[in-house]
Image: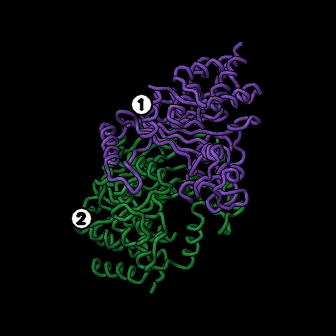
Chain colours: A purple, B green
Amino acid sequence: MSVTVSRKQQIELITSVLRGLGASEEESFIQADVWTEADLRGIHSHGVQRLPVMVTRIQKGLLKVNVKPERTWTTDSVLNVDGKDGFGTAIAETSLRELTPAARKHGVAVLTVRNAAHIGMVGYYAERRALEGLVCIGFTTTEVLVHPFGGAEALVGTNPIAIGIPSSPRPFLLDMATSVSAMGKIIDFKHRGEKIPEGWAIDKEGNPTTDPEAALHGSLTPAGGPKGYGLGISIAMLAGLLPGTEIGRAVLGTLDTEYRCTVGDLFIVLDPKAFPGGETLVAGVKGYLDELRASKPGKGFKQVSAPGDPENRLREERLANGIPHPEEVWHDAERLRSTICK
Amino acid sequence: MSVTVSRKQQIELITSVLRGLGASEEESFIQADVWTEADLRGIHSHGVQRLPVMVTRIQKGLLKVNVKPERTWTTDSVLNVDGKDGFGTAIAETSLRELTPAARKHGVAVLTVRNAAHIGMVGYYAERRALEGLVCIGFTTTEVLVHPFGGAEALVGTNPIAIGIPSSPRPFLLDMATSVSAMGKIIDFKHRGEKIPEGWAIDKEGNPTTDPEAALHGSLTPAGGPKGYGLGISIAMLAGLLPGTEIGRAVLGTLDTEYRCTVGDLFIVLDPKAFPGGETLVAGVKGYLDELRASKPGKGFKQVSAPGDPENRLREERLANGIPHPEEVWHDAERLRSTICK
């Protein structure tokens, strides 16, 4: 059974739950908007289904509401933020807004965030900067879920990267984990009683597996073998070590309800105006993407897509017709509202 | 038949050929050093075997010697360089040296290079910055050799990324193309009369192939499917469009002897001292890499490696015992010297 809700309904529901727990209007809205953008694009693993875990984390004091992050400019172009265990989403977004004038003045500026909750879909922030005419490269860390290339134990996060670049009609947005798949997708296969494709995961002994249950107790395979592995650990160093937080097994607190969140985030923001190709960037990006889309499809494909094309189409459709959720996801959220907002 | 030469012999041979063609001492040495570092690591596709093509390019005026690049600071943190068709290697390296004080002052600085020849192994520059205590992310473009995910035509470069981060005893260095394999490796399989592994390439009709000859007329497959594709085109935009040079099919002049070089390069340099984790960065990187190396190996592997481990081991061995080359590669280079340096 499924329930279809509008963007507005979903944002209102999330906002009222978080407001009911003492979060500020800004914290609540940004958190709701980040999750809703994920659900609009079909990335439900990063959407409202995360609300119950967040509520528990707030109730246990692992995630603090109504927080004033400590922002320190170490140079005129580098902003380092201690999130004081607050909402990663609101802290990242408001800190990026504070960073923007520096990026425009110097052509480049960098933000790090530590001691803040999971920022959700990292592409959210990169796309918003691109909508403002800036280029943004974002990195974030996660709990260890991925085995090293040639390894048998989970020691690397899915550590995603997002790159937003101004284009038309919407920005170019790459938003990808460095593993072949995500744990969320493997859970979906398990629920449907299907086997996972070969090459997605290994079991806890290190053997390749197509059994989702064995994969859940094992680890995810890095995308492109040594390449996803190399990129994943590089992102761990950039987004974990530079901001002064944890790396590897010490990264905790996004999926559980036991630990403070120790992920880290790093954003590099560039102003195209500082570059020789800045004036023609949008035309160049659009022209190249259109050339890719118009090129000859490979076996089994109808058309070549640019990154984000399917998600953008789904987003348009869902903005018009609503977002479908499994009944229990939506009812869980409604139940939280009725308990919290008496 | 193979010939083994020392690092010093190789640098002397390359330097004398380039000096004989009018290149400055600095241009000649940096070009020789970049190629020799690649050969020391076993990356022969980016080593001295490229000398004959470069000599022809210089003789045809496609690559200019003794060039003074035009360096423009558009802000205090962004340096844009017009290489005037000179040596990409020397221009990238000397421009990065000029960029370094800005990175130290502002915590971050960015270099773009256009109108310069192929910079060779992009990791060369990232590793040198890391040896100076800086973090460096480098992107560069190449001719189209890779098909889009779901596509049948070569429309994307192998567009590599390098990330250098200070560590001990040597820096951490990731240096990878965004395709599964490189054209150079496919040529090696052809020479050995062997089939290429599945998933490396498609033929010119868009069908997967294990025939190296068919692959050479077709295109390379992006690493991790949509992920290598998305990253590859992002790098094309960052390193091609922002510097104000070409993208896609208009990128030419690294492998041929017909066209001006229209690749682009973009480097982001960060000073760890501007970040909360700067002081403990080296210890953190080393600790994590050692943990990865000590972890349980997967099926068919003896040990987990960190990126660059095999290359660094080979480099040490070759610094001690010399670099082996196929006889014809070395003799071609010697013949060029005797023709040019009469």
The kind of residue tagged 1 is Leu
Residue that sits furthest to the front in the current view: A1
Regarding residue B276, the answer to whether it shows in the image is: yes
A61 or A169: which is nearer to us? A169
| Crowding at mark 1 (Cα within 10 Å: few <14, some 14-19, many 20+) | some
Identify the chain of the residue marked 2, using the numbered disc in the image: B
Which disc, if any, is residue A249?
A: none
Residue sitting at 56 percent across and 72 percent down? B314
The dot on residue A131 is 1
Mark 2 and mark 1 in contact (Cβ < 8 Å)?
no
The residue tagged 2 is B258
Dot 2 falls on a residue whose secondary structure is loop
Left or right of B309: which side holds B235?
left
Query: Where in the figure is residue A277, as x and y percent of width and height?
Result: 32, 42
Q: Quadrant of the C terminus of chain A?
A: top right
Task: Tell me residue A88's x, y (percent).
Answer: 62, 31
- Rendered view: B108 above or below B90: above
Looking at the rendered structure, the kind of residue marked 2 is: Glu
